[in-house]
Image (cartoon, coloured by chain):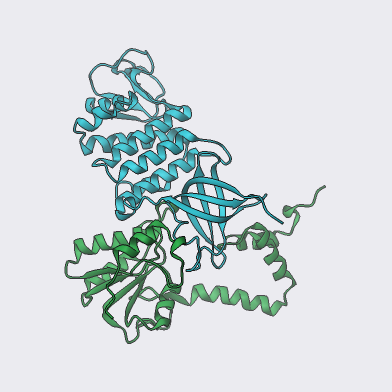
């Protein structure tokens, strides 16, 4: 009897050993969001799957759909991100991006924006002199897409445009408070002081003015502060503590 | 009233929960194992319990290579006996060390990390036996560290971390990585980019 075969293209985010020689892996795809698959015999040295099924591989898989976990019949690698895999720091950063994407994905739910942003950012990481800037852009954009966009132009309370000064950012409220509103008793949680230069970077990200960001020299300190701010926002808004985030600055 | 797992005696429930913490064991298999234990002879169950207890109480990690050793062997473990300390082969698990040792290819010592760096699983260098390796290198006598972690993303990340740290802190120690490429008996058409790229990079001349 012939069985029905389906195909899916996506990025392998994690693999777990199962039984003697099987691998269970998680695939994040544009069409189905997060999906788990089993590759039987993948750990055997002569397996046709070996090498293809590995974290951070963008693959095309053929599988037998079933009620339980889908069993893979064939895998083709599309992009193995070899340049990323050659540097320890980049592997750690790529793992952070994959974990964040997993958190933002649902099972059997389409998410073309997230996949496009994830693959685009991964492709840029290895060629970029400032990989953290690309990760920051990814964090900002996916927060925005998920409906937790930040207001970086106006005061959250009085709606007045922000003056060219250092301002305080509230990760729980998702934006800045002007100095006048700051003195009032607003329940704003923990505040982060953001310098003028850091605000300029955030506004350029919000305007998608990436050329200005790349052309103007962005200091490592500013990028680190912005990444810290974005990571805190993700933690507070999504209420998740990513395991990979503590490895980011090591 | 419907009968569910919570209607079982608490001892059985506890056993199911305990079994389900084992790797590869889901709740269904844990239930099956628990019912199997219930049908077993008292002596057999006692033997199993004693074996589980003793493995934790009487065993420890070797102070040198982190292999599993009996508490009685205070001086040297079986894997460290008659080994050349000039060469240290670093592996992820005890099974990897046994596999290499059984092949007889490597005559030097071993160091078992007990895992690999995997940020997505929350495992960093601190959770592994990496400091023990560095303390061993500090004591001197090592000329080469052979990194034999698995060729996975996690294994590669661990290899890169070790190479970077050893190069920065122990200038006179050479670090090498096991060769990567095509496995014997495989078909070229099924090879992935990574394997092919490694095979091309590490190609050797044929001296016939």
Q: Chain A shown in which color?
A: cyan
Is B28 situated left or right of A15 in this image?
A: right
Please give the letter of the chain rendered in green.
Answer: B
| Residue A100 horizontal/vertical position (percent) | 43, 41
Would you identify the image quadrant in which residue A110 lies?
A: top right
Decide if residue B96 is in sight here. yes
| Residue A158 horizontal/vertical position (percent) | 37, 13
Is B163 situated left or right of A145 in this image?
A: left
- The residue drawn where x is 72% and y is 74% is B40
Decide if residue B68 is in sight here. no
Q: Nearer the viewer, residue A31 or A97?
A: A31
| Residue A59 horizontal/vertical position (percent) | 47, 50
| Residue B107 horizontal/vertical position (percent) | 32, 83
Is B130 situated left or right of A195 in this image?
A: right
- The residue drawn where x is 27% and y is 71% is B145
Residue that extends furthest to the bottom in the rendered view of this protein: B82
Instruction: Reply above or below: A132 against B121.
Output: above
Instruction: Reply above or below: B177 against A121.
Output: below
Residue that extends furthest to the left in the rendered view of this protein: B172
- The residue drawn where x is 42% and y is 53% is B122
What quarter of the picture does the C terminus of chain B occupy?
A: bottom left
């Amino acid at each position: 009897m012939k069985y029905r075969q389906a195909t899916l293209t996506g990025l392998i985010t994690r693999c777990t050993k199962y039984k003697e020689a099987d691998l269970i892996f998680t695939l994040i795809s544009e069409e189905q969001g997060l999906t788990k698959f089993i590759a039987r015999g993948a750990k055997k040295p002569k397996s046709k799957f070996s090498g293809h099924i590995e974290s951070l591989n963008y693959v095309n898989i053929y599988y037998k759909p079933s009620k339980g976990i889908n069993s893979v019949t064939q895998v083709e690698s599309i992009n193995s991100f070899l340049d990323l895999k050659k540097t320890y720091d980049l592997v750690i950063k790529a793992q952070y991006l994959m974990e964040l994407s997993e958190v933002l994905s649902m099972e059997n739910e389409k998410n073309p924006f997230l996949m496009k942003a994830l693959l685009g950012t991964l492709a840029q990481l290895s060629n970029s002199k400032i990989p953290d800037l690309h990760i920051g852009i990814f964090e900002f954009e996916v927060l925005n897409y998920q409906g937790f966009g930040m207001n970086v132009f106006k005061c959250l309370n009085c709606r007045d445009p922000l003056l060219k000064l250092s301002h305080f950012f509230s990760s729980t409220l998702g934006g800045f408070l002007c100095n006048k509103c700051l003195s009032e008793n607003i329940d704003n949680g923990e505040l982060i002081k953001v310098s003028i230069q850091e605000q300029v970077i955030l506004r350029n990200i919000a305007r998608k003015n990436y050329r200005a960001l790349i052309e103007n020299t962005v200091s490592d300190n500013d990028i680190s502060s912005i990444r810290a701010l974005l990571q805190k926002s993700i933690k507070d808004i999504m209420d998740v503590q990513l395991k990979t985030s503590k490895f980011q600055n090591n | 009233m419907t009968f569910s797992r919570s209607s079982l005696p608490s001892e059985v429930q506890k056993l199911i929960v305990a079994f389900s913490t084992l790797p590869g064991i889901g709740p269904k298999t844990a239930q099956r194992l628990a019912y199997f234990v219930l049908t077993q002879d008292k002596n057999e169950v006692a033997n199993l319990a004693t074996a589980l207890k003793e493995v934790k109480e009487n065993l420890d990690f070797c102070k040198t290579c982190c292999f599993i050793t009996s508490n009685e062997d205070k001086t040297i473990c079986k894997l460290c006996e008659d080994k050349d300390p000039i060469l240290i082969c670093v592996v992820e698990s005890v099974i990897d060390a046994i596999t290499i040792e059984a092949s007889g290819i490597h005559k030097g010592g071993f160091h078992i990390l007990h895992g690999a760096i995997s940020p997505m699983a929350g495992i960093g260098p601190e959770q592994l036996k990496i400091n023990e390796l560095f303390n061993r290198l500090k004591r001197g006598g090592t000329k080469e560290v052979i990194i034999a972690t698995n060729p996975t993303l996690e294994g590669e990340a661990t290899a890169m971390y070790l190479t970077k740290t050893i190069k920065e802190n122990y200038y006179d120690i050479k670090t090498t990585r096991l060769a990567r490429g095509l496995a014997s008996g495989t078909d070229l058409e099924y090879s992935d980019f990574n394997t092919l790229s490694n095979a091309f990079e590490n190609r050797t001349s044929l001296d016939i």
